[in-house]
Amino acid sequence: MRLEPRLQTPAWLWLAAPTVALAFTLIVTSLLVAWAGAPVGRSYALLLQGGFGSRFAWTETLTRATPLILTGLAVALAFRARLYNIGAEGQLYAGALAAVAVGGLHGGVGAAAPTWLLFPLMLVAACAAGALLLLAPAWLKVRLGVDEVVTTLLLNFIVLLLVSAMLDGPMKDPSALGWPQSVAIADALQLDKLVPRSRVHTGLLAALALAVALAGLLRHTTLGFEIRAVGANARAAAFAGMPVRAVLWKVALLSGALAGLAGAVEVAGRAGYVTLDMSPGYGYSGIVVAMLAALHPIGVVAAAVFVAGMLVGADSMSRAVGVPTYIADVIVAVALVAVLVATFGLRWRVRFR
Amino acid sequence: MARVGAQATNSPTHAPPLLRLTGITKRFGELVANDGISLDLRAGEVLALLGENGAGKSTLVSILFGHQMADAGHIEVDGRALPPGEPRAALAAGIGMVHQHFTLADNLSVLDNVMLGTEPLWRLRSRRDQARAQLLQIAQRFGLRVEPEARVGELSVGERQRVEILKALTRGARVLILDEPTAVLTPQESTSLFATLQQLVAGGMAIVFISHKLDEVLAVADRVLVLRAGRLVAQMRAASADKASLAEAMVGRAVAPVVREHDTQQAAAAGHASGGSRRVVCALQGATVRNAQRVLLDRVNLDVHAGEVVAIAGVAGNGQQALADLLSGVLALDSGSLAVAGRTLAARPRAWIDAGVARIPEDRQGVGAIGDLAIWENALLERYASRRFARWGILRRDRAHEHAQRIIERFDVRGAGSSGLEARAGALSGGNLQKLILGCALTSPRYRDVGPTLIVAHQPTWGLDVGAVADVHRRLLEACQAGAALLLISEDLDEILSLADRIAVMARGRLTDACPRDQWTLATLGLAMGDASHAATATSPHRTLHDAP
């Protein structure tokens, strides 16, 4: 078996590749569902219904998609410049902590500043915290060539331990009956609900706006041009006089800020305080979302809704037919692998014999 | 000239063919790399396989050697079919290959390299004495001088090639394939290689000699096969062939090589002789560059004047890359001085671009262009920050497109297909990509008709076909005519001799004086290139470039 580069990709393949990827995902996961002893057709119907089949399903899916869009954008931007930021999870928690530090009701009262000042301050603090977390990995990469995959990944665990220490220490909510949770932010700082009697909040609009803004940045600005050039071939970009290091710095700070913002939005839009399980791996799922979206900001929105829908739908499916909720992770993982192989097939031809 | 199909009539002897290829066809997607190629090779003859880059020579050889499998056709050695796709079978049948880039381990001795891979993995004691005796016996039989215990890393390029040949011979090769064997050799080393080949042939071997250089093919081969676009378009006896007919068969049309007009050359030479009536555009004084292991550039002095072509000749790896990087703003001087148009420039590419230096890097795909970006974006790489193409950080696409369109038209870049400027630069052929790079470097959007002051071109026609070579040469000379100084760093002596006003030779990081072209002969060039090629290829950390005599 050999691989040959395609000189041109035929038009039908652009349609066929994702279709085949989807079909492959369905077949593999069907086998698992059948193995779990559930009726395959009904399980899928329940899954789709649970994720997208009702007003409630949609609001739940979009609520979950909001942080996924933001972490997905953070990852997609960084990966575009070949800066492999695996630390969105830690940056999200750092952002959440910073948001509570600025907007939290410490000792029963919050900071004595008006809301119009405190709210942007809270968001800026979250962005700064996320960005700060990438400073050390970016410096190590740019100056010493240390692999940022390792440094950003390991920082996640350090941040989680820091969060744990804060929740049991200075930021502990004394009225939480011993639960490790932080003090809450002031009510005035909480995000409004987008749909009444649901959990969707205005953070979704912010996430959508940022996706559009990022798409515009990459396509229309000089910085976006630099990012794409550095990501595609850093040596050639440097030869052409591009400030490669400065571009990497900017990308690192922007990426960290987006992930940090995800933490603040999650705090302000949902519980209002930080817990150790506030993110079911949004930072890591952001990597999946970004890869599914082929690193395109608008695609990130679609991929985030898909992943969120699967997670929400699998919850309700498992309640009805007893398939473990892990099926959602399997579906997303298989879909990711299938899509990556399919996009590979767009540029390469496999020859047997 | 005997065309294909008449091959039976010109077989040199009545011996059965040692090697016979029948109807070899190989496709890559829509590209037909080999189209029904048939050939016979007899013991005692040198067969040259001539063709431009991309004509299908390498594919044919890799099929023969079992690295690739043909879609159709078969191979016979001594009348027995060779199983396809099995390099082991090819080796066992006596087919040996000397690659252009040697496959030797620098840190091992000659004997170790020759033995490598010939002994069973589970044998506890290696039979070195036996292997040494065999090596020496074969070396003596074919008159190849060799020192079995010498470290390969300390040998010259020509000596390493000899080791490669011996490696094939000790494995029992009867057919030896040499892929562009002279590309890394000085003229003298090439001559000695040809003598070796004659000895091998006299000893009953058959040789396939792959090249795109007409002179060598005529010098060394008995028969010449010409490949073009995957097809065997001509075959002739070398004795009855001439350069013009070979070139025409290779390209498919008559080619007139670009040669400098005599008057400009004289004018430039005169300018030099009279103490530089022309402006000095680039001045290097005692320029020295080191890296951790060795001295890359050793006290280099060089002046390049406006409107003249100065060529740097030399065997690869003698410091040319460091010189090109230095003059592209990528590398900084350790000592000495460097001025462009009288000004000292910082070692940042931006500063050099702004000073009007057009830089053509050796590595087109890796450094000169970004294959995954569109053609128009590549045209913008050096210029996107200028106010003409960006306002408030927003790219002005319409102007960028216009700029790219002008380059494409002026420099005749083809092959973008229906997607036009949006096509990936990586989809362009080597020649068109080089024309694009050249166009971007030579076209300044800000001062429309002002060309560059200095052009630094490193191997600008490496790997291009004859037509594209002529195009690139013409563009470079036009820019010179318009007042630019051209520094041409090349390993191709033909190119240097046809373009340069003055030639300097680089060896071991040192540069000879740049003398007018007429004062050089092929012999003196070869001596200047070769006297140091031995030490230049030594990679041993104990020997810096300084130590050699």
Image (spheres, coloured by chain):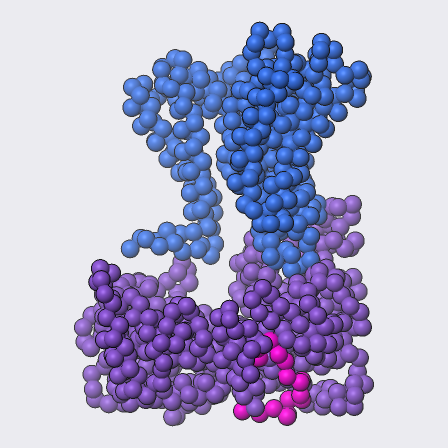
Chain colours: A blue, B purple
Instruction: Give the quarter of the image for residue B297.
Output: bottom right
Q: Is residue A101 left or right of residue A53?
A: right
Kindly identify the residue that appears in the image at 71 percent across and 54 percent down.
Answer: B384
Q: Nearer the viewer, residue B521 or B344?
A: B344
Kindly identify the residue that appears in the image at 32 percent across and 53 percent down.
Answer: A1
Q: Nearer the viewer, residue B129 or B10?
A: B129
Counting from the top left corner in percent of width and height, residue B261 is at 67, 87
Q: Is residue B180 left or right of residue B292?
A: left
Residue that lies at the very extreme toward the left in this rendered image = B80
Where does the magenta region start and end? B507-523
Q: Can the viewer see residue A60?
A: yes
Kindly identify the residue that appears in the image at 74 percent across and 14 percent down.
Answer: A110
Counting from the top left corner in percent of width and height, residue A336 is at 45, 36
Residue A71 included in the magenta stretch of the image: no
Q: Nearer the viewer, residue B85 or A272?
A: A272
Counting from the top left corner in percent of width and height, residue B42 is at 26, 83
Residue B510 included in the magenta stretch of the image: yes
The quadrant the C terminus of chain A occupies is: bottom left
